[in-house]
């Protein structure tokens, strides 16, 4: 696998600071890429060490007692219900396990030869992850004109001026990069995509806030 | 449940052997000694989680609570959470440790790593009212997906490598990584906190991540 997210992205994911949509795309990528999965494991170990070395702040004196009283009432771990998947997947594509719990909408027209399907209901609409399905050779339109786009190839191939992308590859592209990938000529292509809205927020607010906060 | 126990002990044995193996790389000996001590403590806490899973051991839970609950609260507060909510969420984290102890797999993660992921996910659930899509240490696993002994070895090697790497970074580098990622502070706030120019904060963070990458091994 050649196209992996940077350590910065994986660290943001492991520490819990990646926006919801991109976090889902990265979680799906981790099920397909052992190298990235190992890196996230390592960063989570760092999280454990950060916890061990956190300042010790005492809880209320009766905290343990009150929690011991709640233990009996606490039920076993719940199993999350599976989401309702309305979009059919071409060629027997099985979606990565992190997508199982989400509702997935029907395929809808996006551009000639390209369909999209929404994932989940929470969060701001523009940051919601989506599935993209493209006929062979068709160009995927930009998801947005601002922010950072996360695109994970699930089936088929994608190609742009920067390279060729295969299932499991994750493309993290700044919208300023003018990247418009096309599906390979032989096969339908299915991708999971999301936009990081936080960064866009920074760029919008940035002009106003930058002199004060410095970012 | 006995299987869990055997698997756990097997992996602890591996952890011991690896931890005691003399360092062949360039890490300072003191750093290695400290990481061995930390990993030995982790074996003890992992056994306590296993005891909760096996027999609902309240004494084991109280011991975990005494060590972790005040640190989780401090961890949340350092990340900017109000004391009341940090207290509540620390309790919720410990309650989840009790409930999900059966899902803890000592072959996959140390006690601290596992509890960190619980705390992290709960914090996000509260802040965003959404479930963070990061549950790989929480899932029920199918028997055929049980990690092979080689996978367990990988986890233990990672644990030692990361702990030793963190001892090898300078305190300034560790601090800036912690502030930016684990406390979720923007560059500007870190600059104010550390009384450094913004550019220095950015370059220090970049160099710290580069150093970390070298220590963990480039892939």
Image: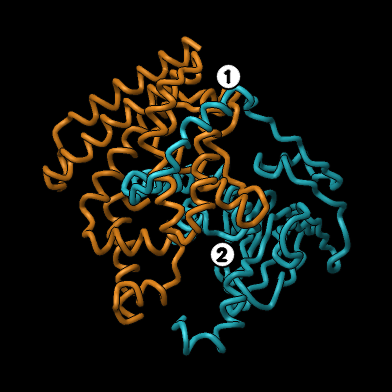
Chain colours: A cyan, B orange
Q: In the image, residue A100 lies at what x, y percent?
A: 72, 40
Q: In the image, residue B140 lies at what x, y percent?
A: 60, 27
Element type where label 2 sits in the image: strand
Chain letter of the residue beneath label 1 in the structure image: B
Pick whichever, A67 or A85, lies toward us: A67
Are there few (<14), some (14-19), or many (20+) residues within 10 Å of tag 2? many
- In the rendered image of this protein, does residue B167 appear above or below residue A127? above
* Whether residue B138 is visible: yes
Q: Quadrant of residue B41?
A: top left
Chain letter of the residue beneath label 2 in the structure image: A
Check the image and name the residue furthest to the left: B29
Q: Quadrant of residue A183?
A: bottom right
Query: Which numbered circle lies on residue B143?
Result: 1
The structure residue drawn at horizontal position 30% and vertical position 73%, both measured from the top left corner, is B194
Kindly identify which residue carries mark 2: A172
Q: Is residue A78 left or right of residue B60?
A: right
The structure residue drawn at horizontal position 82% and vertical position 62%, both measured from the top left corner, is A114
Count the numbered circles shown.
2
Q: In the image, residue B201 lies at what x, y percent?
A: 33, 74
The structure residue drawn at horizontal position 79% and vertical position 46%, both measured from the top left corner, is A103
- In the rendered image of this protein, does residue A14 appear above or below residue B105? below
Which label sits in the foreground, 2 or 1? 1
* Whether residue A3 is visible: no
Q: In the image, residue B38 lies at what x, y percent?
A: 26, 36
């Amino acid at each position: 696998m050649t196209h992996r997210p940077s350590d910065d992205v994986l660290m943001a994911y492991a520490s819990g600071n990646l926006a919801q949509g991109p976090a889902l795309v990265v979680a799906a990528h981790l099920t397909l890429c052992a190298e990235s999965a190992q890196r996230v494991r390592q960063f989570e170990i760092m999280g454990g060490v950060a916890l061990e070395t956190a300042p010790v702040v005492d809880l209320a004196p009766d905290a343990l007692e009150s929690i011991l009283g709640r233990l009996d009432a606490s039920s076993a771990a719940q199993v999350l219900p599976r989401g309702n998947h309305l979009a059919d997947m071409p060629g027997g594509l099985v979606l990565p396990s992190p997508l199982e719990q989400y509702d997935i909408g029907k395929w809808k027209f996006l551009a000639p030869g390209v369909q999209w399907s929404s994932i989940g209901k929470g969060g701001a609409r523009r940051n919601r992850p989506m599935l993209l399905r493209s006929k062979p050779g068709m160009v995927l339109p930009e998801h947005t004109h601002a922010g950072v786009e996360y695109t994970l190839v699930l089936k088929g191939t994608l190609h742009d001026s920067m390279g060729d992308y295969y299932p499991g590859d994750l493309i993290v592209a700044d919208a300023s990069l003018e990247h418009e990938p096309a599906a390979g000529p032989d096969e339908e292509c299915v991708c999971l995509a999301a936009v990081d809205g936080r960064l866009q927020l920074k760029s919008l607010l940035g002009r106003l806030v930058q002199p004060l906060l410095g970012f | 449940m006995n299987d869990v126990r055997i698997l756990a002990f097997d992996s602890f044995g591996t952890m011991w052997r690896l931890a005691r193996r003399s360092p062949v790389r360039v890490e300072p000996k003191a750093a290695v000694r400290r990481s061995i001590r930390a990993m030995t403590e982790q074996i003890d806490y992992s056994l306590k989680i296993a005891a909760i899973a096996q027999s609902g051991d309240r004494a084991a839970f109280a011991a975990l609570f005494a060590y972790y609950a005040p640190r989780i609260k401090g961890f949340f507060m350092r990340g900017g959470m109000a004391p009341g909510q940090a207290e509540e969420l620390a309790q919720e984290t410990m309650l989840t440790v009790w409930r999900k102890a059966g899902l803890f797999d000592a072959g996959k993660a140390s006690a601290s790593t596992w509890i960190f992921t619980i705390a992290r996910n709960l914090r996000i659930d509260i802040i965003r009212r959404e479930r963070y899509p990061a549950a790989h240490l929480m899932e029920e696993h199918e028997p055929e997906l049980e990690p092979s002994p080689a996978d367990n070895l990988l986890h233990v090697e990672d644990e030692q490598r990361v702990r030793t790497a963190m001892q090898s970074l300078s305190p300034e580098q560790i601090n800036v990584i912690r502030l930016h990622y684990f406390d979720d502070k923007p560059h500007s706030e870190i600059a104010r906190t550390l009384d450094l120019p913004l550019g220095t904060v950015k370059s220090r963070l970049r160099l710290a991540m580069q150093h970390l990458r070298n220590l963990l091994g480039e892939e």
